[in-house]
C-alpha cells in the first residue's frame, strides 16, 4: 500500500510549487511540438537539418567551433575524457570528489574506458588553482563542474577560473567544463556563455535542467574533437535513428528560458533570504550564486517532513518534495528556481515562511 500524506504528496497537492518549471509530463514534449507540422523531416543517425542547425546554433552560442548533440550528458562527458586521454596518452583525469562521473555513473569511466580519476581537494570545497598546481600525478584533462552541485552550487571566482585555465594551457592539460548548469551561472559571473567557455577546451551543457527540455546534451569544442566524439557516440549506441523529440524540445525551451536566467537567479537570492530567517535553517551558499542552492535544517528528517507537510497544507505553497538526511539531527534539500517561482503570490510566500518559522521555533523550544 502506498504511504499516504508523505512530503511529496503534500508538495504535489499544494496550490503552488516554488521550484522548477512545472510537472515533467508529456505536455513538456507536446508544447515544444506545437509549432511544427507533421511534414517536418526528422534527423537520421546524427545527420539532417534538425540536428545540424541546432548543433550549429549552440556551438555559436558557446563560442566553439563545433558541437554534437548527445542523448545524455553521461555519455558525452565520458567520451570527452576518453578523447583527451587518447590524445595525450595518459589514462588519468582530475576532478572533484563529488563529480557526477565519480558518484552517479556506476564507475562508467573506469569500467568502460579504463580511465583513472585523480580526486582534487576535499568534498566540501571547490577546486582552486593551488589544488591543480599541487597535483602529484600527470593527467590528460581537468574537469571543472560549474556550479558544484553537490555542495550547494558553489562557484570559484572568474579570476580563479582564468588562472586555472592559464595554468592548464601552460602545462598541456586539457580543461573540460561540466556545464550542466552553465546557463544558470552567467548572471553571477556577468559574462556571456562564450566568455566562460573560452577558458575551456571542451564544454558539455544540458537541456533538461535549467532549460527544462525532455532530455539531451551538447558536447562542444574543436572540429577534430567533435568529429571524434561522433565515432564514440556511435560506439556507445548514442546514434539513435532519430533524436528529434529531444532536439526540438531542447531548441524550444532554450529559446524560451535562456534569457530568463537572471530572473531565476534573483528569485533564488530572494528565497534564500526567507529560508535564512527561519529557526535552525541555513542555505548553502548563504547567498546563492545561481538559481540553485541547498537548504540545511537542524532537525531530524522525519520531523522536518512533518513540519513542512503541515505548512504546505495550511498555506497552499509547496517548498520541496524531497529531503535527505545529513546525520541524525540534520537534513537538507536542493532548491532550483524556474518558471514556477514567479507564479507564487508574494503574500502567500511570506505567509508560508511565517508559518514555517513558527513551527520550527515551537519544535526547538520543546
Image (cartoon, rainbow, N blue to C red):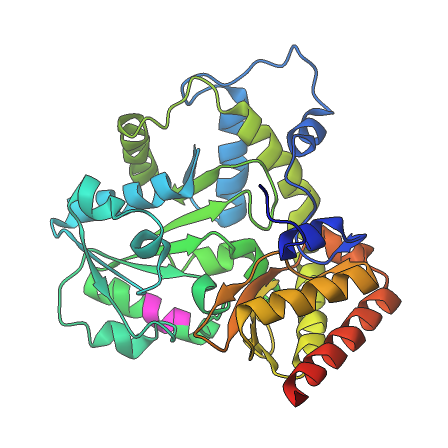
- Extreme residue toward the bottom, this view: 365
Q: Closer to the camera, 99 or 70? A: 99
Q: Closer to the camera, 255 or 358? A: 358
* Count of numbered marks: 0
Considering only vertical position in the picture, is 361 above or below 18?
below
Considering only vertical position in the picture, is 124 above or below 26?
below
Residue 229, horizontal then vertical, whole percent: 31, 35
Residue 123, horizontal then vertical, whole percent: 34, 71
Task: Answer with the quarter of the image where residue 235 lies.
Answer: top left
Considering only vertical position in the picture, is 184 above or below 274?
above
* The magenta segment: 161-165
- Extreme residue toward the front, this view: 1
Horizontally, residue 352 falls left or right of residue 256, namely right
Horizontally, residue 196 falls left or right of residue 81, namely right
> Is residue 51 highlighted in magenta?
no
Q: What residue appears at the point 68 percent right and 25 percent down from the top-left corner?
A: 33
> Is residue 163 highlighted in magenta?
yes
Q: What residue appears at the point 36 percent right and 28 percent down from the top-left corner?
A: 238
Residue 253, horizontal then vertical, whole percent: 65, 40
Task: Answer with the quarter of the image where residue 358 lies.
Answer: bottom right
Q: What residue appears at the point 49 percent right and 78 percent down from the top-left corner?
A: 329
Horizontally, residue 144 falls left or right of residue 232, namely right
Q: Quadrant of the N terminus?
A: top right
Horizontally, residue 348 falls left or right of residue 262, namely right
Q: Quadrant of the C terminus?
A: bottom right
Residue 290 visible somewhere in the drawing: no
Amino acid at each position: 500500500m502506498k504511504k499516504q500524506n508523505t512530503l511529496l504528496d503534500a508538495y504535489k497537492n499544494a496550490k503552488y510549487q516554488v521550484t522548477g518549471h512545472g510537472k515533467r509530463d508529456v505536455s513538456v514534449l507536446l508544447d515544444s511540438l506545437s509549432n511544427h507540422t507533421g511534414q517536418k523531416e526528422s534527423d537520421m543517425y546524427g545527420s539532417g537539418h534538425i540536428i545540424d542547425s541546432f548543433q550549429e546554433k549552440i556551438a555559436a552560442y558557446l563560442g566553439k567551433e563545433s558541437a554534437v548533440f548527445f542523448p545524455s550528458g553521461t555519455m558525452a562527458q565520458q567520451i570527452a575524457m576518453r578523447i583527451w586521454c587518447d590524445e595525450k596518452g595518459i589514462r588519468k583525469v582530475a576532478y572533484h570528489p563529488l563529480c557526477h562521473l565519480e558518484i552517479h555513473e556506476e564507475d562508467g569511466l573506469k569500467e568502460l574506458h579504463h580511465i583513472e580519476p585523480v580526486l582534487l581537494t576535499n568534498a566540501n570545497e571547490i577546486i582552486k588553482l593551488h589544488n591543480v598546481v599541487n597535483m602529484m600525478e600527470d593527467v590528460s584533462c581537468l574537469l571543472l563542474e560549474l556550479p558544484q552541485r553537490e555542495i550547494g552550487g558553489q562557484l570559484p571566482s572568474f579570476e580563479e577560473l582564468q588562472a586555472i585555465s592559464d595554468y592548464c594551457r601552460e602545462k598541456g592539460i586539457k580543461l573540460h567544463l561540466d556545464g550542466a548548469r552553465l546557463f544558470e551561472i552567467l548572471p553571477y559571473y556577468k559574462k556571456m556563455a562564450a566568455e566562460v567557455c573560452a577558458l575551456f577546451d571542451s564544454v558539455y551543457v544540458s537541456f533538461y535542467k535549467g532549460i527544462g527540455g525532455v532530455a539531451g546534451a551538447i558536447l562542444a569544442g574543436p572540429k577534430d574533437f567533435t568529429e571524434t566524439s561522433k565515432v564514440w557516440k556511435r560506439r556507445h549506441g548514442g546514434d539513435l535513428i532519430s533524436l528529434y523529440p529531444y532536439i526540438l524540445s531542447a531548441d524550444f525551451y532554450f529559446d524560451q528560458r535562456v534569457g530568463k536566467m537572471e530572473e531565476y537567479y534573483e528569485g533564488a537570492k530572494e528565497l534564500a533570504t526567507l529560508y535564512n530567517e527561519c529557526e535552525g535553517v541555513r542555505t548553502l551558499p548563504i547567498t546563492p550564486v545561481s538559481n540553485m542552492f541547498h537548504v540545511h535544517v537542524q532537525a531530524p528528517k522525519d520531523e522536518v517532513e512533518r513540519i513542512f507537510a503541515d505548512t504546505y497544507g495550511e498555506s497552499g505553497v509547496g517548498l520541496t518534495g524531497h529531503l535527505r538526511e545529513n546525520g541524525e539531527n540534520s537534513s537538507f534539500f536542493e532548491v532550483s528556481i524556474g518558471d514556477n517561482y514567479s507564479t507564487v503570490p508574494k503574500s502567500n510566500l511570506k505567509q508560508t515562511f511565517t508559518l514555517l518559522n513558527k513551527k520550527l521555533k515551537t519544535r526547538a523550544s520543546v
